[in-house]
Every structure is written in structure tokens, then in C-alpha cells.
Image (cartoon, rainbow, N blue to C red):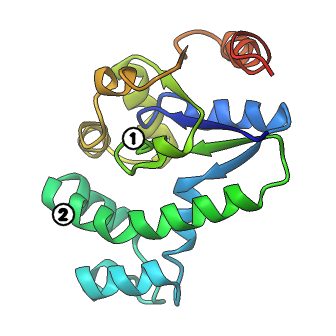
Amino acid sequence: MKRTIGLTGNSGAGKSTVAEYLKELGAEVIDADQISREICDPGQAGYLAVRKAFGPEFFREDGALDRHKLGAHVFADHAELMRLNGILHPLVLEEVRRRRRESEKDTVVIDCALLVDAGLSRDADEIWLVRAGDAQKLERIRSRDGIDETHAGNRLKSQSREEELLAHADVVLVNDGTLEQLRKQVEEYFYGKNGL
């Protein structure tokens, strides 16, 4: 029987690093953020819907979606973020579920920061939450995305509070130490505590 892990955590917590470790352990990782980017490529359903809803000012001269400009806009205005999510979430959910069904791996990981908000938590057998301190998350977001502290802070504020995510979590990985410590936690839960 296929095991499905729902992997979540706020931006900058280290979720992508955990996903990489799980991939190394043989799991198939379905990255909801990557799918969201793919469906917003020119000509795709998300691209067309976002252009219709938000207008051409969020698109570059070459026609591509200006993700930084749209991100700055929606993360500063909760209503606009909800509007964007209402457009993209159903498309992302459909593709995540298709890939999960078609996977030939024993373990599938749904990597999604908005796992609970988007309704994908219902597709998981167990939910893994990656946590880190706010200062660490802010610094990781800033260095990863090349954005200022205000934009990074808005991104964090727009996501579910960790206390809310904790209520759904079966496994909590604390990423405030070394990468080796994080890897050890991943292996322990992958093989041990929730045993395969």
C-alpha cells in the first residue's frame, strides 16, 4: 500500500531540504509550488486565469508572469492573496492528485506550504511539519528569494501560524540545528517511529 506523507511548514523553515532528504530515501516528491509555477507558464490554465483576473500589469514584456511583482502585491493584501489562491489551488490540487495516483513509488510526499489551507492534508496518511525560529525563517527567505525584510515578513504573515499547523501534525521536525541533525530526524521518522 502506498504511503503518502504531507510535508508542510512556513516559508524558510527548511521544508525543501527535508523534501530532498526524503527523495534520497526513495520517496517521490510532488512539489505543489513547482506545479503552481508550471501551470502559470504561458498558455497554461493558471497563466490564462491569472492574466484575466489580475491584468497585464503583472506580466513582463516577454509575456511571462512577473512572479516577484505579483508576489509583492498579494502578500501585502490578504484579499488579493485569497483571490489568487482561489484561482490556482483547484488547478494545483488536480495535478498533485493525478501525479500521486500515477506514482509507482511506495512513498509519495506532497510538499506544500499550504497543505492544510489548500485541502491537501486530506490526501495524506501522515502530516510532517518542519519548524524553525522566525529570525531563521526571515533570513532564509531573504537570502533565497533576494527580497527585502518587509516583503519576507509579509510572506511569513500570510501563511498559517505554526500553532495551527501543529494541531494537524503527526511528525514535527525542528530545523534549528545542523543539517546533519535534520537529516537524522528525517531518517528516524521515515524508517522508525512511523515505521515502514
Taking the view exactly as shown, the residue that stands out farthest to the front is 1
| Residue 112 visible somewhere in the drawing | no
Picture quadrant where residue 86 is located: bottom left
Between circles 2 and 1, the one closer to the viewer is 1
Q: Residue at x 48, y 89 (%)?
A: 62
**Which residue is disc 2 drawn over?**
80
**Circle 1: is it few (<14), some (14-19), or many (20+) Cα within 10 Å?**
some
Could you give the CA–CA distance between mark 2 and mark 1, rounded to whole angstroms? 19 Å
**Disc 2 and disc 1 in contact, CB within 8 angstroms:** no
Which image quadrant: the N terminus? Answer: top right
Q: Position of residue 70 (x, y in %)?
A: 31, 67
Tell me, for residue 104, which label it has, or none: none
The answer to whether residue 148 is left or right of residue 21 is left
Q: Is residue 138 visible?
A: yes
Could you tell whether 162 is left or right of 36 in the image? Answer: left
Quadrant (top left, top right, bottom left, bottom right) of the C terminus: top right
Residue occupying the point 45% across, 19% down: 132
Instruction: Please tell me how many numbered marks the rendered image carries.
Output: 2
Drawn side of residue 28 relative to residue 90, left or right = right
Q: Which residue is mark 1?
A: 116
Q: Residue at x 53, y 67 (%)?
A: 94
Counting residues from the start of the chain, the first of labels 2 and 1 encountered is: 2
Residue at 41% x, 27% y: name it.
Answer: 137
User: Where is residue 186 drawn, in percent x and y?
Assistant: 70, 19
Q: Closer to the camera, 106 or 76?
A: 106
What's the residue type where badge 1 is placed?
Val
Pick the front one: 162 or 171: 171
In the rendered image, residue 41, in percent from the top left (x then y), is placed at 54, 79
Badge 2 amino acid: Glu
Depth check: 67 or 25 in front? 25
